[in-house]
Image (cartoon, rainbow, N blue to C red):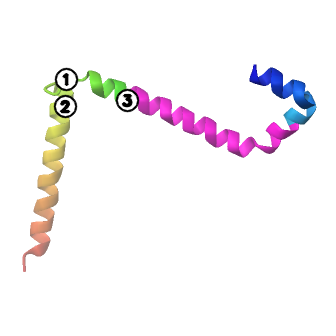
Amino acid sequence: MSAALAIGYNGLSPLWQELLVARGVIFWLMLGGFVWVIGDLFQQYAAKVPRNSAVHSSFEFESALGTAVGNLRLWRTAQP
């Protein structure tokens, strides 16, 4: 419906010229939509993973391990 109105208002040639001028804007809008869809897929996956699953437990372990290693590095550099 919107395409028919846009073409019927001025014709196809002016519409095509406007689209060519707005290529940069259209690119960023399309990229934003793509990133939105990918983020939505990750969010849906995260909602389906139970809290006590192996994936969640491994994330907790990696996080705890990274914190421990970071604290050890800070402790070693703080020693005189």
Question: Decide: marks 2, 3 in contact (CB < 8 A)?
Answer: no
Q: Position of residue 14 (x, y in %)?
A: 90, 35
Q: Residue at x 81, y 44 (%)?
A: 21
Q: Residue at x 19, y 23 (%)?
A: 50
Magenta region, residue range: 17-42
In this view, the residue farthest toward the bottom is 80
Task: Identify the residue position indicated by label 3 in the image.
Answer: 42
Tell me how far mark 1 sits from mark 3, CA to CA: 14 Å
**Would you say residue 52 sits in the magenta stretch?**
no
Q: Residue at x 10, y 61 (%)?
A: 72
Tell me how far mark 2 sits from mark 3, CA to CA: 14 Å
Q: Position of residue 17 (x, y in %)?
A: 87, 38
- Say which label, 1 or 3, has the lower sequence index: 3
Of the pair 1 and 18, the residue shown nearer to us: 1
State the predominant SS element of the stretch in magenta.
Answer: helix
Q: Quadrant of the C terminus?
A: bottom left
Q: Amino acid at mark 2?
A: His
Q: Amino acid at mark 1?
A: Pro
Q: Quadrant of the N terminus?
A: top right
- Say which label, 2 or 3, has the lower sequence index: 3
Query: How many other residues sit within 10 Å of disc 2, few (<14), some (14-19) or many (≥20)?
Result: some
**Would you say residue 25 sits in the magenta stretch?**
yes
Residue 20: quarter of image: top right
Q: Amino acid at mark 3?
A: Phe
Q: Position of residue 26 (x, y in %)?
A: 69, 39
Task: Identify the residue position indicated by label 1 in the image.
Answer: 50
Above-or-below relation of 57 to 71 = above
- Say which label, 2 or 1, has the lower sequence index: 1
SS state under label 3: helix
Tell me how far mark 2 sits from mark 1, CA to CA: 8 Å
Task: Identify the residue position indicated by label 2 in the image.
Answer: 56
SS state under label 1: loop
